[in-house]
Image: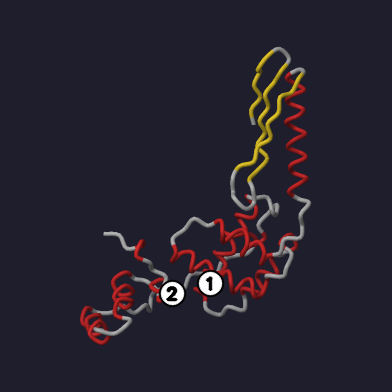
């Protein structure tokens, strides 16, 4: 917000009123106010109040509509990362998509996540939804993020993680040598990628 004197009893006022939900760009209201500086300050206060009321009036947005039509298109991430977000988002939308975004509760999220038995998958889904709902708060779709009231599952223990020996790695490469998926196996082996990440790789992602 800024108030500048631009002449006798004339003030230029610029008020930030949040961001556009779809583009993420900052929204501003600009006006020249005739009168005292207090008149300009009163205009600034009232404009903020009116803007706050406006962002709370649209309560028709569903969880699915927000995730698919607002959050995912707003992401500026690599294709592998987008692929991962899309995967966990699709699972969430299948179960919570019809729920009104303003009415989404911690209990609904928790009972939905309880369907996931694999700890790693549950953590990744929890993390994806937390990031998405944080964006919903920043864009003023909702006042608070309900998932922040939940505890994230503990990370799976790596004590029993098995790692290929050099001999086993060479044997794996020999097994798939000349096959259609040889390049994917090499990417996963040397890059530590999951199968889904290797499948989402594009030429632009491979930098020398």
Q: In front here: 95 or 24?
A: 24
Whether residue 107 sits left or right of residue 117 in the image: it is: right
Q: Which residue is mark 2?
A: 196
Residue 28, image x, y percentages: 65, 37
Residue 174, image x, y percentages: 22, 85
Q: Quadrant of residue 166?
A: bottom left
**Image quadrant in which the N terminus is located:** top right
State the mark number for residue 144: none
Q: In front here: 73 or 107?
A: 73
Instruction: Pick whichever of labels 2 and 1 is earlier in the sequence.
Output: 1
Above or below residue 94? Residue 35 is above
Furthest residue in direction top, as rendered:
8
| Circle 2/circle 1 CB separation < 8 Å | yes
Residue 88, image x, y percentages: 55, 71
* Tag 1 secondary structure: helix
Whether residue 153 sits left or right of residue 165 in the image: it is: right
Give the number of callouts: 2
The residue carrying pointer 2 sits among few (fewer than 14), some (14 to 19) or many (20 or more) residues within 10 Å by Cα, namely: few
Question: What is the distance, in whole Å, between disc 2 and disc 1 at their CAs?
Answer: 10 Å
Q: Which residue is mark 1?
A: 87
């Amino acid at each position: 917000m800024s108030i500048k004197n631009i002449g006798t009893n004339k003030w230029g006022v610029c008020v930030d009123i949040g961001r556009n939900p779809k583009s993420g760009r900052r929204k501003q209201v600009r006006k020249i106010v005739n009168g005292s500086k207090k008149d300009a300050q009163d205009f600034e206060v009232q404009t903020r109040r009116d803007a706050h009321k406006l962002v709370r009036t649209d309560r028709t947005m569903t969880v699915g509509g927000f995730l698919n039509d607002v959050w995912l298109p707003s992401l500026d991430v690599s294709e592998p990362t987008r692929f991962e977000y899309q995967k966990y988002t699709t699972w969430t939308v299948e179960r919570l998509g019809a729920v009104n975004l303003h009415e989404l509760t911690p209990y609904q999220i928790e009972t939905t996540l309880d369907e996931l038995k694999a700890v790693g998958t549950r953590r990744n889904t929890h993390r994806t939804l937390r990031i998405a709902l944080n964006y919903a708060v920043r864009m003023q779709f909702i006042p608070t993020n309900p998932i922040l009231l939940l505890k994230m599952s503990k990370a799976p223990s790596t004590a029993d993680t098995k790692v290929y020996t050099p001999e086993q790695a060479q044997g794996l490469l020999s097994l798939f040598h000349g096959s259609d998926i040889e390049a994917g196996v090499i990417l996963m082996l040397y890059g530590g990628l999951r199968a889904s990440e290797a499948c989402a790789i594009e030429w632009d992602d491979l930098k020398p």
